[in-house]
Amino acid sequence: MKIALINFSPSLQMTKKEIGATASILQDFRRILRHNHQHDIEEVHVKTGCLTEQQMDVLGACGIWVMGFPVYMGGLPGHAMEWLKAVEDMTAMASPGEIKIYGIGNGCLYEGTSAGSAIQSLRLWCNACDFNWCGGIGIGGGPYYSERAVSQTALGRRRTYMRRMNTFGEACAKGLPILNMTCAPDLTAARYVIRHNRGCRKVARSHGLTGLDTNRQN
Amino acid sequence: MKILLHDLSPDEFSQIFPGGISEIRTIGPKDKVHACVGCRSCWLKMPGECPIHDRAGRLGTELSATDELWIISACTYGCVSPFIKKVVDRMMPYQTPFLEIQDNETRFKNRYSDGFLLKVLFYGCDDTGERKYADEYVKRLGKSLGVSDVITYFCSDDELMALGNEVLL
């Protein structure tokens, strides 16, 4: 069965090396799918709320859609919600057949549960479109799995992340439903906060800002 | 100062607020609002300012001066409608990029200390499950924005015309 990896990050990809968090996570997921003998994979990047014919042609041929998205203000990005609404309107006119949906949400906060609201929104969208909701995973500390980490702070071990993604990937490769999962980075929340803040200050300094500037009130 | 975000058509808006609203800043579908592109300029290059110059470009600063934020939104997949979500995403300049731990949870620090009252009116949803998720979303949003209080209302499409004005004003 063909699998579509849908990237809902609106970020521009500057070079092949500078890929964002969602793209990095989907790359890891692609490797896991290949390890589970799934090689027929399409990639779709949704940067705006418009549903294009090219996207419809690619997605219409896939039986499994894996939706990777960053968590914005506790939920799905606004353009992603527009796109989902457009798909719902399209399915109301013509049913695309049985499609299985998986969700991968990544947020900057430490807890993977920060993606919970967005994953519930995806599940409710599946009900509205008559798709099969097969499960989601919320990844805490998402940006730090990216090669273009905002704070340039390595998380070190990725043990929990890879274990959970492997379990999720195995279920997706077989098209089986799985309970929603979360994962947090392999270090304590306090240490994560310290490293994140230190990294943000470093990036801000590289743009000529001081700590006071970053906190300024306009 | 009060700010109203809504996703109503002009006819619906004039039915709910027949006399118009003079002292309240409104953002609605007729205003051009671009979705957040995740550039993080509002955090790390031009703190507090969004580089996209549209109606929501100065939303972070406007929120700092507001006493109440009202949202009228269709309940879509247990969350606000796509248009309102685009506007909410543009509130990122209201926060700083730094994290803190509060109540055993990580959260972004707010740039401004004064909280405002958040009132949200959802319409078009009768499913209690979806209402529960929408309520949780609004509470979470209120926590992340550091609001003083959150009040959520639900009504059907028919009740919207009658309730909208009473509930918010």
Image (tube, coloured by chain):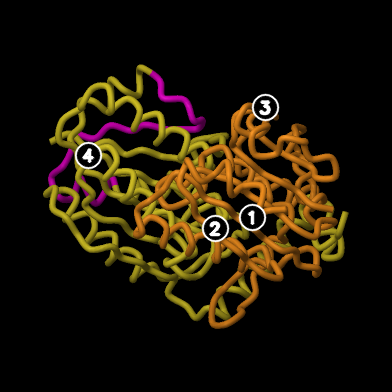
Q: Colour of chain A?
A: yellow
The residue furthest top is: A53
Q: Which residue is mark 2?
A: B153
Q: Are marks 3 and 2 on the same chain?
A: yes
Q: Colour of chain B?
A: orange
Task: Say which element carries label 3.
Answer: loop
Q: Which residue is mark 1?
A: B167
Q: Are marks 3 and 2 in contact (CB under 8 Å)?
A: no
Range of residues picked out in magenta: A30-52
- Residue A57 is at least partly visible in this image: yes
Left or right: A124 as drawn, with respect to A194: left
Q: Are marks 2 and 4 on the same chain?
A: no
Question: Of the numbered discs in the image, which one, if any, rests on residue A34?
Answer: none
Q: Which chain letter matches label 1?
A: B
Q: Are marks 3 and 4 on the same chain?
A: no
The Cα atoms of the two marked residues, 3 and 2, are separated by: 24 Å
Of the numbered discs 3 and 2, the one sitting upstream in the chain is: 3
Which dot, 3 or 1, sits closer to the camera?
Answer: 1
The Cα atoms of the two marked residues, 3 and 1, are separated by: 23 Å
Q: Position of residue A199 (x, y in %)?
A: 66, 64
**Residue at 22% over, 39% down:** A130
Residue A38 drawn above or below residue A151 = above
Q: Which residue is mark 3?
A: B30
Which quadrant holds residue A152? bottom right
